[in-house]
Image (cartoon, rainbow, N blue to C red):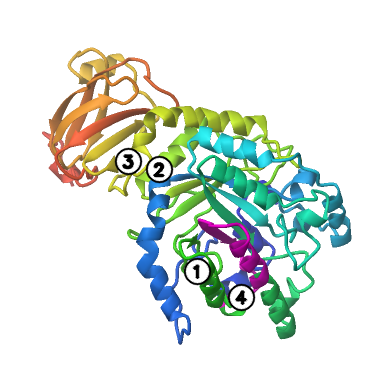
Amino acid sequence: MNMDAISRRLFLKNLGAAGALACATATDSMGLALDQPQTGSNPYSATEAKQAATRAQRMAWWHEAKYGMFIHWGLFSVLGQHEWAMEAEGIPIPQYELMAKHFHPRPNAARDWAKLARRAGQKYMVMTTKHHEGFCMFDTKLTNYCAPQQGPGRDLVREYVEAARAEGLRVGFYYSLMDWHHPDGAKCKTDEAARKRFVAYTHGLIRELMTNYGKIDILWYDVDWPLTPEGWESQRMNQMVFELQPEIIVNNRNGLEGDFSTPEQHVTAAKPGRAWETCMTLNDSWGYNRGDNSWKTPKVIASNLAQCASGGGNYLLNIGPKADGSVPTESVEILATVGKWLDTNGKAIYGTERGSFPGAPNTLFTRRGNTLYVLQKYWPGVTPAAQWMSFFQPGAVIGIGGLKTKVKSARLVKTGQDVQFTQNEPLSLQLKGLPVEAPDSPLSVIEVECESDPIIDAWGMVPLWPRYKVGIS
């Protein structure tokens, strides 16, 4: 099995846990939980109603931000093989526990992460407070299997929180409900006494996280195996969270609808009106994996970010720090390259709105109000055929089919150069006289001012396209 290429939930399916997940929630084709309203009597309906009523206000900053840093860090970083190594390799718990004594991160490594996130153009951070391995990265009174009482000798979550705030970044906590280390973590599925103990433990840890670190902006649940939302007492869990952190936003991975959906390792927009965030790795692993060199290019990262923004979503991009807290050089270089691009082209990403755009082989689109941003992945250059099609006008040409509004002006974002254009509304827009070489990297952006909402309907123009002497069946 290729462990690196699959998501958490797909792996659970391969382990035979899909049946348990299906009892908890319906799933989509990628094995991700679909949003479903809770049915039946609901003693927490007032809390859920308040959550819905305040959602727009609580999430305003998040919709503006678009781009965040995910951090997977834990004992698996010491092993450096994969964040699922404990389960996938069948490592006995006493053997795995030994790594807790050998986990010695350098002081305040999180400061470097936060500075990197700011350089990368990311606006918020989400760090693993407890991954599936069960090791708590924070100070807790509920277990000694935690950073202050093991090798680190200090509260790593507190260092992260302080580092993020120092760089003006919003703070998010990842928390895995599933726990391979706790004696009741699997037993709770079939033993009611174990379930009560494990749920009390889980709610207690979440209460500490929501109480001891000041204002927290995001709670990012993960993997609700082996219990249903009722088994986790997820409604009571969320009620506690919102009582302690009224302005927080939560995702949908404790089995409830939450404030936003979480497609993993693929960019798929939620239905209109539903907030969503794609989480994705820079290579094929979430945690540090010394042998994984499948790094995504800056062009892929920038394109994914633009695709998320195009559909009104966010992009949460992961780093997997080493055990000492240092970030692999490849991650730093990729993030810095995209950050430099965002310094110039951030207006095409931050604060943009969901648009009505088709897929196009060379181009991505985002919008803000009546402004259309054309993000060109593959610059056309100049060929004899292109020159002939543009009636031998100098420069490169980019064509957009089906733009259903009149264009007022266009310019290159990188240089500020005005762009010539011709338009045959609603059939085609041609941006002409462009430089032969791409003006920017990894994507070149053209800002197009329109008279109204820049809807693109490439397929809708097909019946209108003059076919001359070509028959249409």
The residues tagged by marks 4 and 3 sit, at their Cα atoms, a distance apart of 39 Å
Q: Which residues are magenta?
A: 203-229
Residue 260 vs 125, above or below: the answer is below
- Image depth: mark 2 or mark 4 in front: 4
Q: Is residue 214 left or right of residue 396?
A: right
Residue at the spot x=33%, y=44% of the render?
352
Q: Earlier in the sequence, mark 4 or mark 3?
A: 4
Q: Type of residue at label 3?
A: Thr
Q: Secondary structure at mark 2?
A: helix
Q: Type of residue at label 4?
A: Trp
Contact, mark 1 vs mark 3 (Cβ under 8 Å): no
Residue at the spot x=44%, y=63% of the render?
259
Which residue matches tag 4?
A: 232
The residues tagged by marks 2 and 1 sit, at their Cα atoms, a distance apart of 31 Å
Q: Is residue 250 magenta?
A: no
Which residue matches tag 3?
A: 366
Q: Is residue 462 left or right of residue 283?
A: left
Which residue matches tag 2?
A: 307
The residues tagged by marks 4 and 1 sit, at their Cα atoms, a distance apart of 17 Å
Q: Type of residue at label 1?
A: Phe
Residue at the spot x=66%, y=52% of the render?
157
Contact, mark 4 vs mark 3 (Cβ under 8 Å): no
Please give the label number shown on residue 242.
1
Q: Position of residue 101 (x, y in %)?
A: 86, 51
The residues tagged by marks 1 and 3 sit, at their Cα atoms, a distance apart of 33 Å
Q: Secondary structure at mark 1?
A: helix
The residues tagged by marks 2 and 4 sit, at their Cα atoms, a distance apart of 34 Å
Q: Secondary structure at mark 4?
A: helix
Residue 165 vs 407, above or below: the answer is below
Q: Earlier in the sequence, mark 2 or mark 1?
A: 1
Question: Label 3 crowding class (10 Å Cα cut-off): few <14, some 14-19, many 20+?
Answer: many
